[in-house]
Image (tube, rainbow, N blue to C red):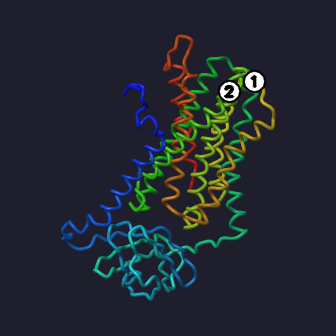
């Protein structure tokens, strides 16, 4: 047998064996560097780098609980705590907080409702880390009453507005091709405004959560994950419906829009629940009416691709539930958890989902000549952005 006829060693080894071998070598080298590499380097000069991010503040009669996380490279030991420059007794872990570790400080302090407070945490090295409570409000306790209230708010701002917007479907069926293109462009404008608004809100929450888990990268990672997930869902739906009539593409696009809006409403509900938990949400008729007008346009976006067919009522109910019910889950989670990092990730998920939906709608905006941007599409885009901006001014939170 010649050298050409003999199978090579590499050919007899499966691809997965090579992959696992390479990964094992990488893991061993990295472990060796982590275990022994530090001994070969000089000690760092200068004081320790101490950073704490405030994850949650809970107020109960006569006490304040603050959950902190170490966002710096060095352990942090909290030695003393002051509230408005007055020393207060507190309990917490006796051990230093390790990197990315967290601790809950229990402060015994008779706070007054509505008053602002500045909590100063003095570390063992003398560094002062401050946290401001703009207005002290008792944190609602988790229970059936809170869940019921958040479910009601989620219904008001999610399910009902989406259902109202979907009622225009019979009118859309009588529209011409030009009107349908304008409505699809209007949908892109609506979704684009939602994506930009959620991105800004997510970046603000990520800054509040500190850099422990990446800060603004949380929003980008959530958006990338959602975009890839929505793309995978679209490919699966396309595989199942490839042999069916072309009209099914409209229902698939409507489902994708509903999923994207639902993920956005999850983040929106999370923000509502978090705002209520810290007393920053004005619960009342203005909030309900404002969100109803603002989110009714989401129902219009869902039914815009369905103008060429008559979907059964159960399909429309399902689309409305997919788009609106996540607002309820978000409100409940936001009120119970109130975690800025989690909120930032979920808002990023909504952004990525909406971007993917926009890429799905864009090909349908072209006219018979293949042009993407003409007066009809430009007018629809501008109208969508303007509608979302103007109705957003009515939301008081």
Which residue is painted at 42% across and 29% down in the image? Answer: 6
Query: Residue 167: x and y, percent?
Result: 74, 35
* Nearer to me, 226 or 277: 226
First in residue order: circle 2 vs circle 1? 2
* Label 2–label 1 contact, CB within 8 A: yes
Q: Which mark is residue 225?
A: none
Dot 2: few (<14), some (14–19), or many (≥20) neighbours within 10 Å? some
Q: CA distance from mark 2 to mark 1?
A: 8 Å
Query: Residue 202: x and y, percent?
Result: 47, 52
Quadrant location of the C terminus in the rendered image: bottom right
**Secondary structure under badge 2?**
helix
The residue indicated by pointer 2 is 250
Query: Residue 24: x and y, percent?
Result: 41, 53
Residue 304 placement: quadrant = top right
Dot 1: few (<14), some (14–19), or many (≥20) neighbours within 10 Å? few
Q: Is residue 3 left or right of residue 335?
A: left
Q: Residue furthest right?
A: 313
**Secondary structure under badge 1?**
loop
Q: Is residue 117 above or below residue 232?
A: below
Q: Residue furthest front?
A: 1
Quadrant location of the N terminus in the rendered image: top left
Q: Is residue 220 above or below residue 355?
A: below
* Nearer to me, 204 or 355: 355
Which residue is painted at 80% across and 38% down in the image? Answer: 314
Query: Residue 78: x and y, percent?
Result: 38, 80
Which residue is painted at 71% across and 39% down in the image? Answer: 319
The residue indicated by pointer 1 is 309
* Nearer to me, 312 or 64: 312
Q: Is residue 166 above or below residue 205?
A: above
């Amino acid at each position: 047998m010649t050298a050409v006829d003999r199978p090579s060693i590499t050919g007899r080894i499966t691809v997965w064996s090579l992959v696992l071998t390479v990964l094992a070598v990488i893991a061993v080298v990295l472990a060796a560097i982590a275990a022994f590499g530090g001994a070969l380097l000089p000690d760092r000069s200068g004081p320790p780098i101490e950073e704490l991010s405030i994850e949650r503040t809970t107020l109960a009669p006569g006490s304040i609980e603050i959950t902190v996380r170490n966002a710096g490279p060095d352990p942090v030991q909290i030695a003393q705590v002051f509230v408005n420059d007055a020393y207060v007794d507190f309990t917490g872990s006796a051990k230093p907080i390790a990197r990315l570790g967290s601790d809950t400080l229990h402060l015994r302090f008779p706070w007054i409702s509505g008053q602002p407070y500045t909590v100063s945490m003095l570390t063992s090295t003398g560094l002062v880390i401050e946290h401001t409570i703009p207005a002290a409000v008792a944190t609602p306790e988790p229970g059936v009453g809170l869940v019921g209230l958040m479910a009601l708010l989620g219904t008001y701002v999610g399910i009902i507005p989406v259902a109202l917007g979907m009622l225009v479907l019979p009118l859309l069926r009588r529209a011409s091709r030009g009107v349908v293109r304008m409505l699809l462009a209007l949908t892109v404008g609506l979704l684009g405004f939602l994506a930009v608004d959620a991105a800004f809100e997510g970046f603000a929450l990520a800054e509040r959560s500190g850099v422990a888990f990446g800060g603004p990268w949380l929003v980008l990672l959530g958006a990338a994950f959602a975009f890839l997930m929505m793309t995978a869902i679209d490919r699966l739906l396309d595989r199942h419906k490839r042999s069916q009539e072309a009209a099914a593409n409209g229902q698939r696009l409507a489902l994708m829009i509903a999923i994207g809006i639902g993920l956005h409403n999850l983040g929106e509900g999370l923000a509502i629940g978090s705002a209520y938990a810290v007393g920053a949400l004005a619960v009342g008729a203005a909030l309900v009416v404002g969100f109803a007008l603002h989110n009714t346009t989401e129902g219009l976006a869902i039914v815009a691709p369905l103008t060429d067919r008559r979907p059964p009522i159960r399909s429309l109910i399902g689309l409305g539930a997919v788009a609106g019910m996540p607002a309820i889950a978000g409100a409940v989670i936001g009120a119970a958890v109130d975690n800025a990092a989690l909120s930032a990730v979920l808002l990023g998920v909504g952004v990525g989902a909406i971007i993917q939906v926009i890429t799905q709608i864009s090909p349908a905006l072209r006219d018979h000549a293949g042009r993407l941007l003409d007066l009809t599409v430009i007018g629809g885009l501008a109208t969508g952005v303007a509608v979302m901006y103007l109705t957003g001014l009515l939301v008081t939170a």
